[in-house]
Image: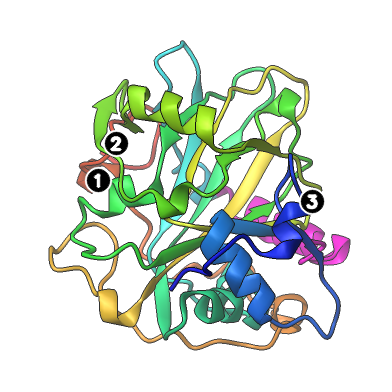
């Protein structure tokens, strides 16, 4: 599955993740697959245009009732980020993001088989208050959900500028090839074993993924990552779409869906969608059903 040696392009991106520019002719190449398998991910600059990001933002802000259901994830340091998560993409603007070819189709190509929508989440680090997310692999969570293989992927789409000051994503390149790390529940978050994290950060490249609105990081579920709190006056919102391979259908019923056919749409469906307010069928997550986190239930729409 993995390339026998480091792809040449990876050698040119020492100190940062490999980057590609989105164009109307964008498609997944063999080089991109090799980079994904070797480094654990890559960045696509401008996957979404400024117009698209503004439209997605409008759709989110128009659904205040939904945004009010976001819950807080404590970082154990006196701060918390807010999180909103849903199981099915739906037919609204946010659903078109998760279903469009440049997101879902890219993830399908990188995983090498049919995928389905595992969930989408909006992660909100507000200025001066947004908390950190501790070191983890996504498969550290999803292994506990009954996914037998690490055949999952996430597309991390920046809604705001993501820089060191407001807690941008940090990754350790190549850790997708290191297998699953033991994870434990620490301060309400599922966290990778700190001793192993320290070893990996010494032997692999620890990268700050600074992004502009519309940039997207595609990364493997075993890629080790974290983010610090937001100490700046800038908001840091991110829109994350995660996918699982059809042949990796979870064996344990849990708070994320089993295989559900994903009906992909063309890229222009995002801007052409007029459905902004209808969130029916998305199956918003009740955090009380998620055994991999502890959340502050106060002031959410769930009881």
Viewer can see residue 286? no
Tell me the residue at 67%/51% (across/down).
61
C-alpha distance separating marks 2 and 3: 28 Å
- 194 w.r.t. 42: above or below: above
Tell me the residue at 42%/85% (across/down).
113
Q: Looking at this rendering, what residue extends furthest in the left direction?
A: 252
Tell me the residue at 29%/36% (across/down).
293
Helix, strand or loop for disc 2: loop
Disc sitting over residue 290 in the figure: 1
Q: Position of residue 109 (x, y in %)?
A: 55, 81
Helix, strand or loop for disc 3: loop
Magenta-highlighted residues: 45-64
Callout 1 crowding tier (Cα within 10 Å): few <14, some 14–19, many ≥20: some
Helix, strand or loop for disc 1: loop
Q: Earlier in the sequence, mark 1 or mark 3?
A: 3
Q: Please tell me in which quadrant of the rendered image residue 129 appears.
A: top right
Q: Position of residue 223 (x, y in %)?
A: 47, 49
- The residue nearer to you, when weighing 85 against 28, is 28
Q: Position of residue 253 (x, y in %)?
A: 14, 64
Q: Are marks 2 and 1 in contact (CB under 8 Å)?
A: yes
Quadrant including the N terminus: bottom left
- 229 w.r.t. 89: above or below: above
Which coloring applies here?
A: rainbow
Magenta part, dominant SS: helix
Disc sitting over residue 293 in the figure: 2
Q: Please tell me in which quadrant of the rendered image residue 249 appears.
A: bottom left
């Amino acid at each position: 599955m993995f390339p026998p040696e480091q792809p040449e392009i990876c050698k040119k991106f020492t100190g940062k993740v490999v980057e590609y520019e989105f164009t109307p002719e964008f498609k997944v190449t063999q080089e991109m697959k090799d980079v994904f398998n070797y480094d654990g991910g890559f960045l696509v600059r401008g996957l979404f245009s400024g117009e698209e990001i503004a439209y997605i933002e409008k759709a989110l802000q128009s659904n205040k009732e939904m945004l009010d259901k976001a819950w807080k994830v404590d970082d154990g340091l006196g701060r918390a980020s807010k999180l909103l998560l849903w199981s099915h993409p739906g037919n609204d603007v946010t659903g078109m993001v998760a279903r469009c070819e440049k997101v879902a189709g890219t993830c399908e190509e990188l995983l090498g088989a049919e995928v389905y929508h595992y969930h989408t989440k909006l992660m909100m680090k507000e200025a001066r208050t947004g908390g950190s997310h501790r070191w983890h692999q996504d498969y550290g969570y999803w292994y506990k959900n009954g996914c037998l293989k690490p055949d999952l992927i996430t597309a991390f789409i920046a809604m705001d500028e993501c820089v060191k000051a407001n807690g941008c994503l940090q990754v350790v390149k190549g850790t997708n090839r290191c297998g699953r790390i033991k994870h434990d529940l620490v301060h309400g978050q599922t966290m990778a074993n700190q001793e192993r994290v320290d070893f990996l950060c010494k032997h692999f490249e620890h990268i700050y993924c600074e992004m502009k609105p519309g940039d997207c990081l595609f990364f493997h579920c075993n890629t080790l990552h974290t983010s610090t709190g937001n100490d700046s006056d800038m908001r840091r919102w991110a829109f994350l779409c995660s996918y699982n391979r059809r042949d990796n259908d979870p064996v344990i019923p849990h708070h994320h869906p089993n295989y559900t056919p994903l009906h992909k749409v063309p890229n222009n469906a995002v801007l052409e969608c007029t459905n902004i307010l209808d969130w029916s069928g998305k199956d918003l997550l009740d955090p009380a059903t998620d055994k991999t986190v502890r959340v502050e239930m106060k002031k959410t729409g769930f009881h």
